[in-house]
Image (cartoon, helix red, strand yellow):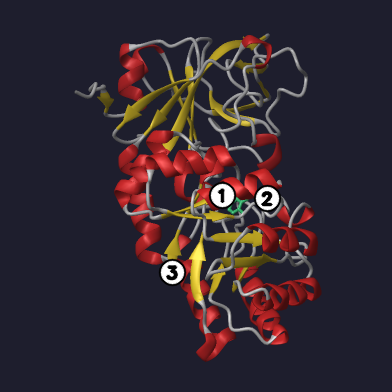
Amino acid sequence: MGLSKTIWATPGEYLRNHAPDHPVLFFSPAILQATARRFIKGFPGLVTYAVKSNPDEEVLANLVAAGIRGFDVASPVEMDTIARIAPGAAMHYNNPVRSRTEILHAVKLGVRSYSVDSHSELVKLGELVPADGVEISVRFKLPVEGAAYNFGAKFGATVEKAVELLTLASQLGFTPSLTFHPGTQCTDPHAWDKYIRAAAGIARDAGVKLARLNVGGGFPSHRLSDIAPQLETTFDLIGRVAREAFGEDVPALVCEPGRGLVAESYSLATRVKAIRDDAHVFLNDGVYGGLSELHLVGVIDRIGVFGPHGVARGGEPVFRTVFGPTCDSLDKLPSELAFPAEMEEEDHVIFYGLGAYSVATATKFNGFGQITVETVQSHR
Ligand SMILES: *Cc1c(COP(=O)(O)O)cnc(C)c1O
């Protein structure tokens, strides 16, 4: 017998009935499943989910229910979770640096796809993973702009090295593929254009026909009211450029979104602890909690402010500096936010589109960060 839990129509309905003094995340399974179906319908290839962006088990179960059959995993814990929640789903072990113990764990769980960006790690895989049709995806990087921050700083072989690694992976008997990640929150679709054309060049120079091309995550979520991401335009561009660049040898395409899939399904209600001397706003959550990546990726200006009994506040926008609850001076949002003039202490400020890198990275620093999760039909 399962426990049934309340599904609120919106966060506003919940706030009409409660006045939580701790941060509350609102999760909409309906929105998550709709976004997953949008990816599956629009992306010209296999859609997998990057587990690290939000490993909540309800998220994973809803993605499976919506038809997601593959997952980008980076650690034994993530692999064990997928093996349990989504038995039989494909696991792509796309963390290019692994210990021998971690590799053996993956082999034991039947993982059949690994990314690699260095010679030493490829040799290690060659020693521990029986080739037997297993895929090695060489991860490469380009100096391309467009994302909120650059993933190439940590991972990715140069184009020249990718040619060598692809040749060697093929010689070792692995199924040769390529992968890249244009950087998270990549709002410029032309980054994919450059990467896909470079991938075709690498395959040509290595004299290898690619089995698959994994075009990464990086699909942006809606953070700033004025900039709505154009997912379908990006999907179409990816399909068209792959056909142009590879011609007859076009590989099967794979994507592994984290943020783009999960962000919109959550919102976060914080509470105004104080408007200190009518200037700065102090919220009960900040960069050590659910708002942890704002100082890396930039502020989210999609907010709603609710007074007592969930009544939406109005009035002229007033720009204010925003601090989180801890005593660390870093605990501050990277830019001011516009709040309605009517806002008062104890109001709730809801941030929309906060499903990625929020629950996943929240800490309990300084005794804060007790976040609870409520289920909603939709966010507004
Ligand atoms: C984090 C990560 C992703 C997901 O990135 P998003 O920007 O959240 O879409 C995909 N692939 C790999 C290898 C990653 O490390």
- Label 2, secondary structure: give it: loop
Q: Where is residue 260 in the image (x, y as percent from the top left)?
A: 50, 51
State left or right for residue 190 relative to residue 89. right
Q: Quadrant of the N terminus?
A: top left
Reading the chain from its start, which is encountered first: label 2 or label 3?
3
Q: Observer-nearest residue: 9 or 93? A: 93
Q: Mark 3 points at which residue?
A: 45
Task: Tell me which residue sits at (72%, 63%) in the image.
Answer: 122
Residue kind at label 1, given as amino acid type: Ala
- Label 3, secondary structure: give it: loop
Badge 3: how crowded within 10 Å, few (<14), some, or many (20+)? many
State left or right for residue 341 relative to residue 296. left
The disc at residue 148 is: 2
Select label 1 or label 3 by which is in front: 1
Is the residue 375 above or below the residue 191 in the image? above
Select label 1 or label 2 by which is in front: 1
Residue 198 image-quadrant placement: bottom right
Tally the marks. Answer: 3
Q: How far apart are marks 1 and 2 (CA)?
A: 31 Å
Residue 156 visible to the viewer: no
Residue kind at label 2, given as amino acid type: Ala
Reading the chain from its start, which is encountered first: label 1 or label 2?
1
- Furthest-bottom residue in this view: 248
